[in-house]
Amino acid sequence: MKTIINQKLIDRNKKLSLVLFFASMAVLIFGAYLAWPGKADVSRTVYSWIALMFGFILTRVSIYFTSRFGQTPRYDEVIGQAIDKLRSEYTYFVYSTPVPMLLLGPCRLWLPVLMTSSGTISYIDGKWKHTGVSIIKRFMGQETIADPDKDATEAINEVRKQLTLQGIPLEEQPQIQPVLVIILKNTIIGEVKDAPYPVVILNDFKRFVRKVDREQCEKPLSLEETEKITKALTAGKI
């Protein structure tokens, strides 16, 4: 498997996550200082609450960037390790296309939609359900599943738009297959038989991709098409 990675963007956002962390800590400490007993008055109390709320917002943004760029291994590295043994006809794009992660195979584009929270994930009555996440975990920054359908649709539209802008008409573009990938071992897959796209655990992702590409490949991409798609996806991104 080949990997095309935008290391400059990753390094920049990793530094940004550190800046946001220290900035949020400074604002929270300043807010606590303003509210210190014996020093507080009405105006200081108001400024304290403003500082604390702003610090909380910064903390949430910091957690978002840290979870994607500051931790080791990063989510893209976790996915990369899971699919590392795919054949050379696969290309793994990391922050080098309009979406964070994309896998180009011999028949289609694979779009990993990551589930990075514990709890139980289900699809019931046409809606995704995420249960079993405590209020404390949510407060501490654990992400919950919001609307994977919307996320997948927006990502597909961004990829389609990029390919079209680079001269590949819609009818010549490959199928884009979203897959909800469960990252954590303690995440439980509930009722998902009616889900709009597959739900797999991380360790099964590579096996699933291989199986589908082997059994459901009506029109394999030629080498020329693969090179053209790769060039179009990364144009202006790296």
Image: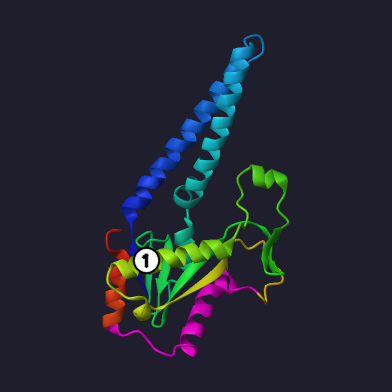
Instruction: Please tell me which residue lies in front, 125 or 36.
Output: 125
- Name the residue rendered at 45%, 60% in the picture: 76
Q: Quadrant of the N terminus?
A: bottom left
Residue with the mark numbered 1: 161
Rendered location of residue 51, percent (x, y)? 55, 25
> Is residue 82 left or right of 117 when viewed as pictured?
left
Rendered location of residue 15, percent (x, y)? 39, 42
> Is residue 125 left or right of 42 when viewed as pictured?
right
Q: Quadrant of the C terminus?
A: bottom left
- Name the residue rendered at 26%, 82% in the picture: 224
User: Bounds of the magenta span?
Assistant: 195-223
Can residue 88 be seen at all in this image of the molecule? no
Q: Is residue 69 above or below residue 90?
A: above
Q: Is residue 154 magenta?
A: no
Q: Which SS class for mark 1?
A: helix
Can residue 229 be seen at all in this image of the molecule? yes
- Name the residue rendered at 38%, 59% in the picture: 95
Q: Is residue 159 above or below residue 219?
A: above
- Residue type at tag 1: Lys
- Name the residue rendered at 39%, 89% in the picture: 219
